[in-house]
Image (cartoon, rainbow, N blue to C red):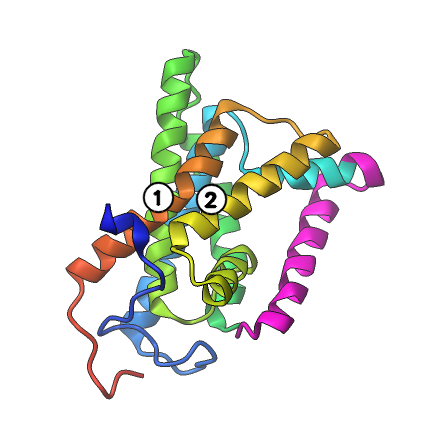
Amino acid sequence: MKIFLIKSVPTVSWSSGRSLNFKPRFLTLALLCFGLVIFGFGEGLLIASGAGVSPWTVFAQGIAIISGWSIGVATFTVGVAVLILWIPMRQTPGIGTILNATIIAAVMEISLPYLPHPQLYVLRAAEAAVGVLLVGLGSAIYLVANLGAGPRDGLMTGLQRITGYPITYVRTSIEVAIVFLGWVLGGAVGLGTLMFAFGIGPALSIGLHAVKCLSPEPVEDSL
């Protein structure tokens, strides 16, 4: 399907004209934050499902096991390493890069106590699936705002630009590779982990398509 062959983040009427924009329009900033809230809620659902954590968390677990670091330190180190990879790919950070970490973490912290923790495995899988779809949608909204991506999304867009492959393929390849490395290092892999690894690419493409279809076309003086 063509929807899974999208090769770039679309530009719409409310997209920022550049990533490094410290005076974005209110609508652009508001939709960026809205997308990150949805993203964080989706991540919270994945954790609450108990079906498995995201591939990058599995990787951080593996790093923590072989290094003796805490999971928090390992996660931070991985994030910094990914940001360093931005340099040769000429990725530009922005407000969204900072808000990505703060808003997603805050939403997860606030929502987790109130999210369902089902006992039946089929319900766990269903909750994880909803979480993956929401992460895809939230990612699409905040990426279309074009105010700077988070470390992992920036890696994805950078590799997509270099390779020219569809976003679905690039994102899926990254997540599958990371979960494999994490598993080899000793990280715990669950059904939810695999659902995220193989599902986030298509979910993101669906989200990007939906955002583009529901948004007005860009105008030339878009900031």
Q: Is residue 121 above or below residue 114?
A: above
Q: Are marks 2 and 1 in contact (CB under 8 Å)?
A: yes
Q: Quadrant of residue 119?
A: top left
Label total for image? 2
Q: Secondary structure at mark 2?
A: helix
Q: Residues within 10 Å of mark 1 (few under 14, many from 20)?
A: many
Residue at 72% in and 36% down: 62
Residue at 29% in and 56% down: 208
> Quick one: 138 or 107, which is closer to the camera?
138
- Seen as rendered, the residue at the extreme top is 120
Q: Quadrant of residue 117?
A: top left
The magenta segment? 65-92
Point out the tag, 2 or 1, that comes first from the N-terminus: 2
Q: Which residue is mark 1?
A: 202
Q: Which three-letter amino acid code belongs to the residue tagged 1?
A: Pro
Q: Is residue 217 left or right of residue 123?
A: left
In the rendering, at what x and y percent does residue 18 appear? 40, 80
- Seen as rendered, the residue at the extreme bottom is 221
In the rendering, at what x and y percent does residue 33 appear? 38, 61
In the rendering, at what x and y percent does residue 106 appear? 50, 50
Q: Residues within 10 Å of mark 2 (few under 14, many from 20)?
A: some
Residue at 31% in and 63% down: 31
Quarter holding the N terminus is top left
| Residue 37 can be seen in this image | no
Q: Is residue 56 left or right of residue 146?
A: right
Quarter holding the C terminus is bottom left
Q: Is residue 142 above or below residue 74?
A: below
Queried whether the magenta region covers residue 76, the answer comes back as yes
Queried whether the magenta region covers residue 14, the answer comes back as no
Q: Which residue is mark 2?
A: 172
> Quick one: 152 or 28, which is closer to the camera?
152
Residue 212 tag number:
none
